[in-house]
Amino acid sequence: MTQALTPDVKAGAQPLPSGTEACGCCAGVLPATPQPGFNRIGLAAISYRIGDQAQFKASLVAGLNTASLPALAALRTRAQADFTIGLIDAFACAADVLSFYQERIVQESFLRTATERVSLQELGRLIGCRLKPGVAAETLLAFALETPPVPPATLAPEPGNFVTGVPAALRLDAGLKVSSVPGPGEQPQAFETVEPIEARPEWNAMRPWLAEARQPARGDTETWLAGIRTGLRAGDALLFVDDAFRTNPSSDRWDFRLVDSVEPDSANDRTRVRWKRGLGSIVPRMDPAAQPQAHALRRRAAAYGHNAPKWRSMTEAFRTDYVAAVGSGTATQGEWPLFTLSPRGATSTGGWIDLDAVYSEVANASFVVLAKGDFNRPNEPMPAGAYVELFEVAGTAEVSRSDFALSGKVTRLQLRGENYSAQFTGATAVRDTSAFVQSERLPFAPYPVVADVAGATVPAAVRADGLLPGRRLIVKGRPVAGGATLVHVCTLVGATALDGARCTLQIDPPLPAALQRASVVVYANVALASHGESVTQILGSGDAGQPFQRFELQQVPLTYRAAATETGAKSELLLRVGDVQWTEQPTLYAQPADAAVFRVDLDENGRTLLRFGDGANGARLPSGTNNVRATYRRGIGAAGNVRAETLTQPATRPLGLKSVANPLAASGGTDPEPPDAARRTMPLSVRTLGRAVSVPDYEDFARAFAGIAKAQAAVLKLPAGPTVVVTVAGAGGTVLLPANPVRQHLLDALKAAGDPYVPLRLLAHQASTFRVGLRVKCDPAYDRDAVLAAVEAALRARYAFDARELGQPVQHSDVIACVHGVAGVIATDLDRLYGGTLPAAQTLPSRQLRLLASRMRVVGGVPLPAELLVLDPAPLDRLEAM
């Protein structure tokens, strides 16, 4: 505004030259309002005021000099204390206030510039769009029940219950409340189950069987024996034979082995015993015993006479006299006369053997193995001269022997078996034969089962009774390949009983990785739970004479759960008027006059209001006293995304319930939509109109879905044909795994909104990070540390999840521009820019001009998701002043 006084023109003065008034110096006091209004496209705020207090006052003062208002000519003073000037000043203040709020109203009338949530709500209502109310987090709870004690045999408890009253099975109804154990700076969060389940103690934490009873088989080189005090050590003899040998001594289905190693397993009270040569034989082919028993042959004995002096070492006179005494042989033969295992001789079904000493522990019906030669070879066949034969002891006796220049008491065994006379009656048998005696049966222990758990079949050491298809399961275990513990959510397809205590579970989907068997746990007492707790409230009394009657919910925020709807959320509100349930609708407009419907609104103060019809757009409430009742749940938002194993405090504890936990972290919880997000998503509703026809429709539909922050859609050529593939990212950068409820509901909603004959795939985004290293030259007038902190804050804001898009690259120049936008920065040296958390394998970290983020593509027939590049949350690779 130009303000100038008109100069006095005195008599005789020369007039001003023509045209000199164009400078405005002599124009006098001019009005300063209304100010011209012009706004460029894309501004974050609109300038709409026609003036402020000073401008309004100047315009009013200028109006006092207006020639068209001669009545004001007498008001010549401009002193601030003058009443007229004071009145003008007061009116200018009022005009300033009015213009300020007029501009605020205009600001709130446009989607880009509105700042109040209620404004966005009303703008969205014009196009039938509602702000996302947020979604409650969900997780799966695994319940553990008390195991009922076994009642005394003298009592007969009722079926299904033991005398203690602890049930053998328990129905857990929906609404069972569980609270979380908060961490530092957190608040407890309440969850409630949203489905009933039947639970049993044996389903608390099912595990695969880690051992199974089996017998040694052909080719085995080890077995497990019960206990850790077997008395075995390396070199001891083991016999594997069954009772069939006693009735058929000619059977060759037995195995004799010398122990190679003994490994006690005290944790499982068993012992592993190993030998070198596998059971059974190749030449001739012979299988082990059908029902083998393990026998330890505790003593290794020799035959009487094995230590007799050499016959030829005796004097000739002795040999002559000895031959005469025994009446057999000659003095010049190579070995002692009658040099046999026993003077009793042999028969077709066995023979006798005199041992080298007294072995009183050898009992009738025990087993004896006679072996000669190099019989303990690890491979087949045995060398020439080696032979092993099994016999059963048919009788024992202690006798005195005085032969072969030896004398003493010995144990004589009568043996029953085959090939005795053919293999153990020669002149060399006495010195070459070893007798393994004093057999002791050793019971087998269950064999450890170490096979990995993989695929669609999971072993479980429980009965199959009651495990019906459709039951939700959680399989937890450590991957064989290493890494973090895997928690897999699946559905039971079927349970195949193996015996009274074991079964195999068929699951869908299959395990994504093989798991270490000993680490696997299967939870079957699993129920879906949602963030929030139930509230019952009497809202008030209906009044048929009042249109658009409304009530307020006392407990906020109202819980919304993820659902396969257009918006992706559905409220947990049940309203009854009298005994009639009324239905929630997004709008009352055009509802039938008698429709029992209502609308839920959120006002600017965060209150939840229930609005009813006027008799033309929805029915009015019938008159009654306290006849309007609501049952709902309160609790919503990202605060419900609690960590795994924190939901452990059951507020409701029915008889038999022992404990509860959440093997998986809660997910899907999102806060109510902030204004910036609402500006982006609100127009999407009028683009899709609840349908997905084109590829952009699929992307827009997904972006407008509750719990989805970013989406990208494309048509990819897969082996099955062209397929619409949508990559989605959850709120706050959450990777939406297949088990996430938001992802499941979005997939269902897209299928319902789109063409059912169009193939559709949904992928979780690939979250990637990059790092930067730079030096900054700071203006000496600024605090250096403050400038560096501001640079880091600017980079983190520019490259945060909310500021990035799927497939968006990171430009070297953009990083520099971001840094130079910080006050106090004179120059920047960006020398490190690379993807991942570590630089490439080179001398210096890489500096790339551009980091590309992958878009959706097909590799090997498999669709891969789009990539989202954000700045790594770790400290910057380098940030220092020049």
Image (cartoon, rainbow, N blue to C red):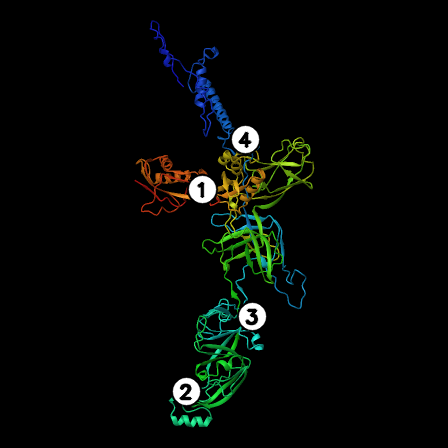
In the picture, which quadrant includes the N terminus?
top left
Residue 208 can be seen, yes or no: yes
Q: Of label 3 and label 4, which has the lower sequence position?
A: 4
Residue 857 position, x and y percent, is 46, 41
- Crowd class of label 4 (few under 14; some 14 to 19; many from 20; radius 10 Å): many
**SS category of the residue bearing label 4:** helix
- CB under 8 Å between callouts 3 and 2? no
**SS category of the residue bearing label 1:** strand
Residue 25 can be seen, yes or no: no
Q: Nearer the viewer, mark 3 or mark 2?
A: 2
Q: Is residue 211 left or right of residue 833?
A: right
- Crowd class of label 3 (few under 14; some 14 to 19; many from 20; radius 10 Å): some
Q: What residue is pinned by disc 2? A: 334
Give the spatial CA distance, label 1 vs label 2: 92 Å
Q: Is residue 781 left or right of residue 804?
A: left
Residue 24 position, x and y percent, is 38, 14
Which of the two residues, 639 or 237, is positioned nearer the viewer here?
237
Give the spatial CA distance, label 3 vs label 4: 84 Å
Q: What residue is pinned by disc 3? A: 290
